[in-house]
Image (cartoon, rainbow, N blue to C red):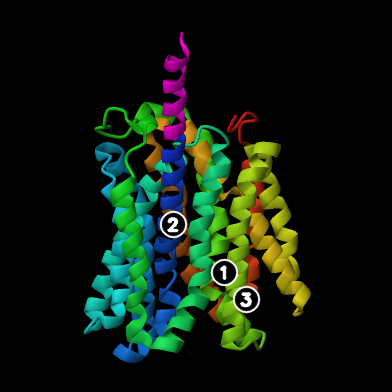
Amino acid sequence: MNAGSAVLPLNGAKTRTQAGALALILFSLGHFFVDLYSGSLGVMQPFLIQRFQLTLTQAGLLGGLLVFSSSVTQPLYGYLSDRFRSRYFSALGPAVAGAFILGASLAPSYYWATVSMLIGGIGVSAFHPQASSWAALGMKRDRAKWMSVFISAGTLGIAVAPALFKEVITRAGFEQIVWAVIPGLLVTVLLVAFVREPAEAAVAPSRGFDWPALRSVQRPLSILYFGVFFRSAIQVTYSHFLVLYLSRERGYSIHAAAYTLTLYLTAGALGGFVGGYLSDIVGARRLIILSFALSVPFMAVFFLTNSPIGVISLVLGGLILLFTIPVNVVVAQQLVPSQAATVSALLMGFAWGAAGMIFIPATGWLADHTSLRTALSALLIFPLLGWALARHLPEDLGR
């Protein structure tokens, strides 16, 4: 082999690496804005209630529709993405999510606000399966680490949404919130222009679920799913009720409570990023077990003391609890590579949405009959259940 022929493969490998890095950056940006827009409803809700004179039941329906259309439907879009492999599933997500979720601020009636929220949720739902399947596929090494970048970008978007949209509304007015769609539109343009299906994913389109492949790993995949479900019971419910709990039962101002929630969610985003690195060191199975076990004591301290130490403990508990977000997704994709988008949707969207649809109203019901402190602290049983379940994962998981 002469020197010239050796250069071509090297240049080709370099080009593929650069394309993989660009895709990771753009998908991570898309994930940030998609989840940022989906996290805007909590701030928008009081204004929508005032504008349309809504009951709390009607306001809750808006949130339920968004959870359903943005999370529970993700396996459907995972299936469609695995079958048709069009990049528009993910590329259009940021623009659709931003335009329609924020566009509810301009809706002429409650009916059109619900329609707008439903369509915006579809943008969120369509983005996640394909983007999570393709984001780190071009990276040859340490895929869990690179997946943590993608996933943490979305968690960070959710984290900063309360504080960011509160400032936008305060400074510009509620109807002007729709202009925050502009960055999402730009990211959609970049995704359409520069992202293509990774070569590693270029296989014959699937005409259905790969049932034999799914059945062969149903035990570890089920354990991973319920682990995510238990973790999401904490994360999604705390995201919904923490501001209310701090302001009602601990005497925080709304401003202080909102920024405490942002701090807690930001720690979760950092936890996902750190977890991707730790997985390469301690192994996926051990990290999942440790995450469940170590998060509980820290979060329990938060309910035992009304002091800065309690808030610090809550933040640390949230950080540790979310160590396993990228790990679960990468391992599931490795278990069923032929259905990567579908299993990603199952673990990222469906588990999150199902937990929210069950535990948000259940926690509210329990709080009505006891207190928010009792209802929220009772949820700490779920990381313990996750710990017990994760111990049955295979020793070689993720290797």
Q: Is residue 12 magenta?
A: yes
- The location of residue 378, given as percent across then percent down, is 64, 66
User: Quadrant where the C terminus lies?
Assistant: top right
Q: Is residue 384 above or below residue 108?
A: above
- The location of residue 322, given as percent across then percent down, is 60, 55
Tag 3 and tag 1, C-beta contact below 8 Å:
no
Disc number at residue 260?
A: 3
Q: Tell me the mark number nearer the camera, choosing from 3 and 1.
A: 3
Q: CA distance from mark 3 to mark 2?
A: 24 Å
Q: Tell me the mark number nearer the camera, choosing from 3 and 2.
A: 2
Q: Which residues are magenta?
A: 1-16
Disc number at residue 29?
A: 2
- The location of residue 152, given as percent across then percent down, is 54, 55
- The amino acid at mark 2 is Leu
Q: Earlier in the sequence, mark 3 or mark 2?
A: 2
Q: CA distance from mark 1 to mark 2?
A: 25 Å
Q: Is residue 289 visible?
A: yes
Q: Quadrant of residue 244?
A: bottom right
Q: Is residue 121 visible?
A: no
- The amino acid at mark 1 is Tyr
Badge 3, how many Cα within 10 Å: few under 14, some, many 20+?
many
Describe the element under mark 3 as helix, strand or loop.
helix
Q: Is residue 31 above or below residue 257?
A: above
Q: Earlier in the sequence, mark 1 or mark 2?
A: 2
In this orientation, which residue lies closer to the viewer: 385 or 98? 98
Badge 1, how many Cα within 10 Å: few under 14, some, many 20+?
many
- The amino acid at mark 3 is Thr
- Horizontal side of residue 392 vs 95, given as left or right: right
Q: CA distance from mark 3 to mark 1?
A: 11 Å
Furthest toward the top, the residue is 1
